[in-house]
Image (cartoon, coloured by chain):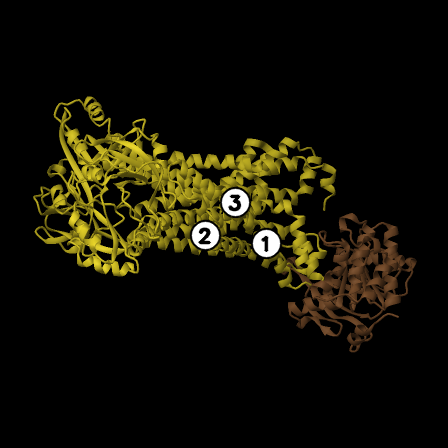
Chain colours: A brown, B yellow
Amino acid sequence: MIDRDSEQTAGQTARQIAAQAQGLVKVYGNGAASVRALDGVDLAVEAGRFTVVMGASGSGKSTLMHCLAGLEKPTAGTVTVAGESLGSLSDKRLTMLRRDRVGFVFQAFNLIPTLTARENILLPLSLAGRRPDPAWWDLIIGRLRLEDRLDHRPGQLSGGQQQRVACARALLGRPTIIFADEPTGNLDSRSSGEIMTLLRSSVDDFGQTVVMVTHDPVGASYSDRVVFLADGRIVEDATDVTVADILSRLARLQPATAETGGS
Amino acid sequence: MLRYALRNLLARKARLGMSLLSIALGVAFLAGVLTFDHGLRHTFDNILDGSTPDAVVRVAGADQTSGQATTATLTPEDVARLAALPEAAAAYGNVVGHGVSLVGHDGRLVGGNGAPTLAFNRTASRNLLGEPIMQLQQGHWPQGPRDLTMDARAADRAGYRIGDEVTLVVPTSALVAHLRLVGTATFTGGGTAGAILLLVSTQGAQQLFLGGRDAYSSVDLAAAAGTSPDQLVTAARRVLPSGFEAVTGKQAVDEAQDSIGAVLGAVTTFFLVFAGIAVIVCGLLILNTFTILVAQRTRELAVLRALGASRAQVSRSVLIEASVLACVATMLGVVGGWGLARGLAAAFAALGLEIAGSALTLTTSTVVLCAVVGITGTVVAAYVPARRAGRVPPVAAMQVTAPTGAGTRQRLLIAGALLAVGVLAATAGLTGVWGHRSLWVGGAGVVWIVALATSCGTVGRPLLALLREAFTRLFGVTGQLGGQNALRDSRRTGATASALMIGMAVVSTISILAASLNRSVDDLVDQNFAADFIVTSPAYTPFPTSIGDRLATVEGVGLVVRQQVAQATLDGRSVMIDGNDASFDRIYRLDILAGTPRLDAGQALVDSDTARAHGWRVGSGFTVQFPGLHVLRLHVAGIARTSQVTAPISVPIDDLAAAGVARQDSAVSILLAPGADAHAVHQRLDAAIADVPVVSVQDKAQYAAAIHGQVNQLLYLIYGLLALAVIIAVLGIVNTLGLSVVERTRELGLLRAVGVSRVQLRAMITLESVATALLGAALGVVVGLATGVLLRQALSDDITSLDVPVWQLLVFLAGSVAAGVLAATVPAVRASRLDVLQAIATE
């Protein structure tokens, strides 16, 4: 089966929780122009599960993910990833953490246009000066059906293919957690379905932890758990939801968002 | 990361083309100068090695490279005694002529523009390498007193063939000698660097140069087998007459190399300064290019950071890109520089200064130095953008627009501080508290340039805003957009403009100095010079006294005053001494502070600076030593205010002759007889020397114009050298515009979509370019104006009058507009050809 040694050792201290936020506050700007993007968020992301964060534009869902991924420093509160508290880490340690423990899938794919698909997938490992485990490489490339596309440049690939390359890039390092930021935002519905199936199976088959931010109820329905955000706070937290569930919850949230937005 | 950097480089070939070209140009300039310098040195080394014997007996105490003639000679008995020494294999008496000129077949002077015409007797002497100094090419060596053999190249230049009668101007009363060309020879050492070699028989040389006396000016010694040159010299010293010294060939070569090296060193430094300016301008272009590339790549760099690249890794990738670029450009530049040196040598050869082509090789040190300058220069310039790349926040990978750092205030503070430092330096220079005044002011100029280069974008904002208004008025909305584009990232515009500013600042400074120098010459000639005509040779070299004798007999000439400039030593230091005819105070308007300018034998007129330095008053005595160990005892008869028309010490001209200096004239000044017609006399003077084209008779206006011509020649040379810096700066504008067009593809497409025509789009980009060029030129002219005026003030001893060439400065500004239009051509055409739909779809 799949070799999960590194996951095991890393997970010793936080077997259940891959990433955790406590009392997270993020304020942009200062004085009258300040915006409170996160207003006291507590969230524990369980390992080996697929967690989705939903919310309207400006609800703070992207900021939450940036903070969890160590891309932004919170104004207050703590973030722990793979048992390490991010607040005390230097830029260097934070970089190492991103490199070794975190994977990213972006809305805009963000492949390096001058590198081939293969080189893009290998990029995080080569940044760390490591080589991939051949069996793991074959497994991922096969599962993502990228064998014929490895020597193409991103410009020669379709959107769905590019995002598959991005997923392979995230999976190859076997990170503690993968953050996906609207991964289907730039894709048609067929490609979207493909990517979501892929993320789902990475959780089921490889025990990968995935956190995804999305607008898309269909995408969210692939998850184990959906966290709804409004005005920087968690307002709902549901497990094993269907598309209909999500739509009704979103509909319920809508007026509340309008009210608080207006006040 | 290495692969990432290399891929980026390949993917952006076109964007880096201008940077590549500019580094290559800068390095080519440097390599060209160094190679040419090496070739020149090699040529002179060959000349020295090829013409110096084992040991030489020569007049003592002479500055060997000044070429000053003395009247001291050796007798045939002296030569015989030297030849009889057991340490000597042979001794060859040399008879060397000074003040000889070759007149070409067409009656015009050959050479005379710096490289000497050397006339000497042909001997069998051999050089340090044991080779004959000259090798016969055609015909035979001179035998009779009327025979002449000359170097083949000179014969070619003069248009003579064997058997022709050759005209020489010689320092005898006849002034002109006609000799028969019996052979041509080549110099064993290779190129003669433009020198003309004339070989005559010993008897002929004695007739031409020594009034027929059987005597010699120096002796070449060849060492006997098993004798070292040192032993030979020691032996020779025992039999030498006084006033002469014996030195080894090696010592003679070393001395000559030192003094030639000093001159060549100054020339090389002069060229290197301009190479340095070009390299600095290059550096600015690199800095700008990489800043823009990093800004355009922000998102990609952020992705790298998000994927776990450290700051250092990201910075390094930019530096790797820069160094690979630099390596390629340096290689191209070095090869280009070698070609440049070949071209320069060809140009010099056309002027008669041939440089051995074999000496124009790329030496290891040249290649290493060029590589060091090219690569470190590029990497240093790319360092700031590379650091900025490392600081891109990873979260920028997920944001649409990346925040850019401000820091304008900090830059303004630095610029302000630098400006103040410059003012302090200039004040120090003008008050002359310590050291060289002009160096202080020049330093201030450099500091000001740096200050403006760091703050160009901020300081230039008001000017750019003004230009936007002007463009709006003139060209409507197209003008407004163009002006606004220059203003929107004023730091980028400023950085681009500052490259041009540097070139313009130096050009303006130089033009002010040159104009002031010309004005000073006019004023000097007008106010301090009373002569109606001045007779000089083109290169201000001395000429035979018989020319003055002839001119004195011309009808309508009232007074002829001769002047000879001689070199002597005073307290162990070299000093210039003027020998003047008695009535020289009628030619020069001197400000006599004490005593009288009417000098008797043994009396001197000294200038006030020299008098102060030595504590002399009227009546003080001092001695100066001339070559051949002749000592002249002098008393101060008068003190004149220091001016440019006299040397520090002036003595009666006959005293120079008494001190063993061979009489020649450096200048002859002529006053008209009362009532004589200037025009008619000028014609008669010209006619009197028509057969000796070594000098020209000029009135005051012509004389000033001739000096202007020389000043302007230097000025144009400097302009030519600065042109490279300006070209690189214009390349920088092309580069920035090109990158901006790529960056704004979407915006340009949008403009086209809403109805902006291609012509309007081109106009918009051209106006942005013009605004950039004008900003650079205007700031450059302002700095140059300030520096030039202050520098003139600091140099007011030499450049007595100030002249600001307003028209010229306006032409520079107009030229920068033209450069702006030119620079915009390619980017504007590219922008106007964008496919509208594709452009809008571009992210």
Q: Position of residue B750 (x, y in %)?
A: 70, 39
B63 lies above or below B719: below
Residue drawn at x 59%, y 32% is B476
Q: Nearer the viewer, residue A162 or B814?
A: A162
Describe the element under mark 1 as helix, strand or loop.
helix
What kind of residue is marked 2?
Answer: Ala
**Disc nearer the start of the sequence (2/1):** 1
B551 lies above or below B642: above
- Name the quadrant of the N terminus of chain B: bottom right
Using the rendered image of the protein, determine whether residue B646 is visible from the camera's viewpoint.
Answer: no
Q: Where is residue B555 in the image (x, y as percent from the top left)?
A: 14, 24
Discs 2 and 1 lie in a common subunit: yes
Q: Which of A68 and B62 is in front in this view?
A: B62
Classed neighbour count for the residue bearing mark 1: other residues with Cα under 10 Å, few (<14), some (14–19), many (≥20) = many
What kind of residue is marked 3?
Answer: Gly
What kind of residue is marked 1?
Answer: Ala
**Disc nearer the start of the sequence (3/2):** 3
Which dot marks residue B451? Answer: 2
- Per the image, the residue denoted by label 1 is B322
Image quadrant in which you'd find residue B484 = top right
- Per the image, the residue denoted by label 3 is B336
B22 displayed left or right of B195: right
- The answer for how far apart the CA atoms under marks 2 and 1 are is 25 Å
Describe the element under mark 2 as helix, strand or loop.
helix
Q: Nearer the viewer, residue B203 or A200?
A: B203
Count of residue discs: 3
Query: Which chain does tag 1 point to?
Result: B
**Disc nearer the start of the sequence (1/3):** 1
